[in-house]
Amino acid sequence: MLGIDRYGFFFRADTDDYEGFLSSLLLPEEARRSSLALRAFNVELAQVKDSISQKTIGLMRMQFWQTAVEEIYRDDPPNQPVSTELWRAVRTHDLTKRWMLKIIAEREKDLDDRAYRNLQELETYSENTQSSLLYLLLECLGVKNVHADHAASHIGKAQGIVMCLRATPYYSSRRKVYLPMDICMLHEASQEDFIRGRQEKHIRDVVYDIASQAHVHLQHARSFSHMVPAAATPAFLQTVVLEDYLHKVRKADFDVFHKSLQNRNPLLPIQMYLRSWKKTY
């Protein structure tokens, strides 16, 4: 399924960011196109790490995007589809340049291709990438509220942690493990254990600890939901995705390699629609 050409750029919703695509469709019309542009920008950056054979090439691509953002804010965007749409979003919603540059800088640091030293490092990465994207989505919705920003911070951290867990089978099959080393060491789990797809208790304990931290962030975000304006809730629709994964991994007894975790939830569009209708997260 292609993301909608009438918005002026290609976006492979089924492979690039299916869940982000769904949540963008449920945004108000005035924010939808800009949300898709931001998600396409995020996908472009996220794909760099897995599409290069040398770090130098990745650095060059990150430099392209850093220059592109600077040119966008000078009203002189590069002749490139995502850049053009990003420029339109910036002009329409007066988006903050700092958040875009943070995403680029953090993605560039991630090119070092190593495991996170500790859970805090993973949270910092998540804050600078996922939370920064949520801050931009809030701006697209015209929301300026400290409680909404606080919720975005926690939801972004939860999302980054869940994404790290979800990607573990994929990267393990390529002999790479990015899970926080402090949690792995605590449970005496080696990278080789994950590479071999082991399911012993100490491996599941690592997953439990990491998943629990994502759950904590989700609960923190909801603890002050009564102070978050209803206009902000469309930006947080991916909490449905986080809930779904955390429920399934708990049901699989924290076996991150369980087949049930690789299956897409066919009810996800309906669940996200209901959440948007209720204006909750």
Image (cartoon, rainbow, N blue to C red):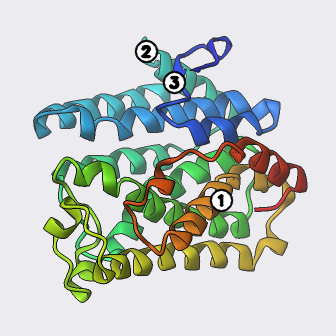
Circle on res. 239: 1
Image x and y of residue 276, in percent: 82, 50
Q: Characterize the local packing of mark 1: few (<14), some (14-19) or many (20 or more) Cα atoms within 10 angstroms.
A: many
Q: Earlier in the sequence, mark 2 or mark 1?
A: 2
Which residue shows up at 66% across the image and 72% down it? 221
Q: 243 or 55, which lies in front?
A: 243
Q: Which amino acid does label 1 sit on?
A: Thr
Q: Which amino acid does label 3 sit on?
A: Arg
* SS state under label 3: strand
Q: Characterize the local packing of mark 3: few (<14), some (14-19) or many (20 or more) Cα atoms within 10 angstroms.
A: some
In the displayed structure, does residue 88 sit left or right of residue 208?
right
Image x and y of residue 127, in percent: 46, 62
Q: Characterize the local packing of mark 2: few (<14), some (14-19) or many (20 or more) Cα atoms within 10 angstroms.
A: few
Q: 195 or 38, which lies in front?
A: 195
Query: Which residue is situated farthest in the bottom direction here?
Result: 186
Q: Name the residue under label 2.
A: 80
Displayed quadrant of residue 193: bottom left
Q: What residue type is labelled 2?
A: Gln
